[in-house]
Image (cartoon, coloured by chain):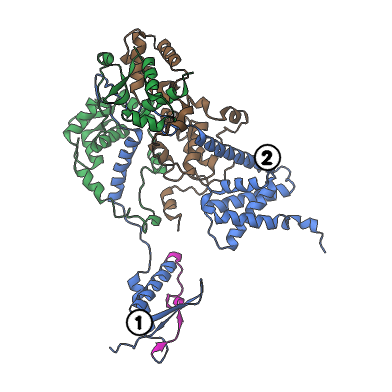
Chain colours: A green, B brown, C blue
Amino acid sequence: MTPAPIRLLEALLFAAAEPLSVKDLHERLPEGTDIGAALMALQGYYEGRGVVLNEIDGKWAFRTAPDLGDALKLEREASKKPSRAALETLAIVAYHQPVTRAEIENIRGVATHRGTLDFLIEAGWVKPGRRRETPGKPLTWVTTTSFLDQFCLESIMDLPGLDDLKASGLLDRRPAIEVIPSSGDLFAPADRLDEEETEDM
Amino acid sequence: MTPAPIRLLEALLFAAAEPLSVKDLHERLPEGTDIGAALMALQGYYEGRGVVLNEIDGKWAFRTAPDLGDALKLEREASKKPSRAALETLAIVAYHQPVTRAEIENIRGVATHRGTLDFLIEAGWVKPGRRRETPGKPLTWVTTTSFLDQFCLESIMDLPGLDDLKASGLLDRRPAIEVIPSSGDLFAPADRLDEEETEDM
Amino acid sequence: MISPSVFQEDHPRVAEDSVHEADALLLDIDGYEGPTDVLLELARTQKVDLSKISILQLARQYLVFVERAKALNLDLAAEYLVMAAWLAYLKSRLLLPREPGGEEPGAAEMAEALQFQLRRLEAMQNAAGKLQTLPRLGQDVFARGMPETFPVTTATRWDASFYDLLKAYGDIRRRRENSSYDLPVFNLMSADEAMERVTRMLGQLPRTGLKSVWTTLESFIPEDIRDKIFGRSALAATLLAGLELVKQGRIEIRQDGLFRPVYLRETSERETP
């Protein structure tokens, strides 16, 4: 087993949200630890591996080995949250598929921004289904396998029904009488309406 | 120098905060890599170290060694504390899964309050499973990979005391006594909402 | 004199203790997750393995609990009363000899089912406790603090959880419902109404000199109120009106101790119209 201070050092550097200075490490490691020696030893373990222990500006951090960048197409990028409009549209397609664009708008009660469906198609969550056999033969929309993957569902049948949503508290947020005096829930959702008007993508 | 595929694997897993499935790894590693063998080799390297390679529900992630928790003194994530009802419900889903809401209610002997299941869904610990092939096709609930990750379990087979509970027959989900007005058997609250509205008066 | 053994059931020796337990439970009734939870707690007071529990004693303990609630004028939720009815039935079945050829479930089976229910709930409560003792990610075990992400060649990783999806759908449905949703109408007495009523009635009180006689707060409240909520709101609104009039220096208010009646009297010179 690796000596205790080195294990701890390794765990600290792994879990830290930012590079740590020797001073930071001093505060967190047992008193009397030879930090310099421990860092050298740890750096030795990672020699030639997929991960390296780097010193940048007097601070220490693990990084994936620079030569692997190409192979991994490594890029720093924060994951993004889909817009509210996109999520709502996606939810409607999921629950009401196959569903036409007019129906989506009718259910949402807001005109659907052109980009919203485009976004869902590009994300790979929604695809065109059959045309409806009604005048104008409108195109319908359905969800894809990759939609199921994203939300860890095995089948579209596994979406909770309305009664399930109700029971789990997701559907009905009507203020019960006991909340009236304490919180402003009853009159508050004014801001929610503002939010809806702006269909940001 | 460590063999190239293992270096890549190490870099991939080290860089990710979330567990990666073998499928994820497949897509990013050179074709023909024996991922199983590479994972085993990598896990061997980290044996007894401050960071260890864990399998969670068939996915893989580096995590700090569990025995270092106290010594790490890292900022603890301020997580919302589950209520007693939520924890009990979580335990029932974990041990009895897949389990329907009616079954949860029967085991607990109370109707599920709003905020219980939706807390668990929001935390990402519980998700819908397949619908039960019984009349009404009720939705079942199961735990997620993120639940296992969060509670440092490799699989639901590792739930504490699972074998004893199984042996004692206590994991039977069938209703024992039918006096619980939960699933609407007794008072048939076709309209559960009314019931909730007035319950605190 | 009738032999006490005949009525043994009506004079349980555990009565004193049971009342004590019942009160302790009633004090913390909000801390319990329904009648089964309360039953489990009562069962624990028997201090035996749940598989050896006396169901008859347990039924008695629970019925004492419900009786105490009634005696203390506490409103128990309907589910507690349903359980009481079920247990009372079970108790009678356990005490009476079984009718031959009866189609109803045997008392022994019912008792066994109850016992199973309690053991299963206890097991799940213990399991919940054990879950809490497991090391937790972000508390005892940590993930990579500075994650680097690898975009798949096709698209960005979208951070949308299943919860987000359900919530989005819930929002839409709710919006639709809300469009035709009427706020529940509660029949309450408003403070203005109470003020109007109290002022009017004060003027009709008998007086001695500048002051009227002391009159209880209750006498200002309309009689024959059937609606409990309206009654409570009337009491609150009348008290509020009283306090406001005290502030204006028009009346005095008096209460001789906690939970004693509240008296009002007019003090000011009556305004001449």
Q: Secondary structure at mark 1?
A: loop
- Within-10-Å neighbours for mark 2: few <14, some 14–19, many 20+: few
Q: Secondary structure at mark 2?
A: loop
**Quarter the C terminus of chain B occupies:** bottom left
At x 45%, y 14%, the residue is B44
- Within-10-Å neighbours for mark 1: few <14, some 14–19, many 20+: some
Q: Nearer the viewer, residue B141 or B17?
A: B17
Q: Are marks 1 and 2 on the same chain?
A: yes
* Chain of the residue where label 2 is placed in the rendered structure: C
- Tell me the amino acid under the disc marked 2: Asp
The answer for how far apart the CA atoms under marks 1 and 2 are is: 67 Å
The mark found on residue A143 in the picture is: none
Q: Nearer the viewer, residue B170 or B31?
A: B31
- Is residue B176 shown above or below A131? below
Which stretch appears magenta? C210-229
Residue A198 in view, yes or no: yes
- Is residue B194 shown above or below A23? below
In the figure, is residue A80 to the left or right of B190? left
| Residue C221 included in the magenta stretch of the image | yes
Q: Which residue is mark 1?
A: C250
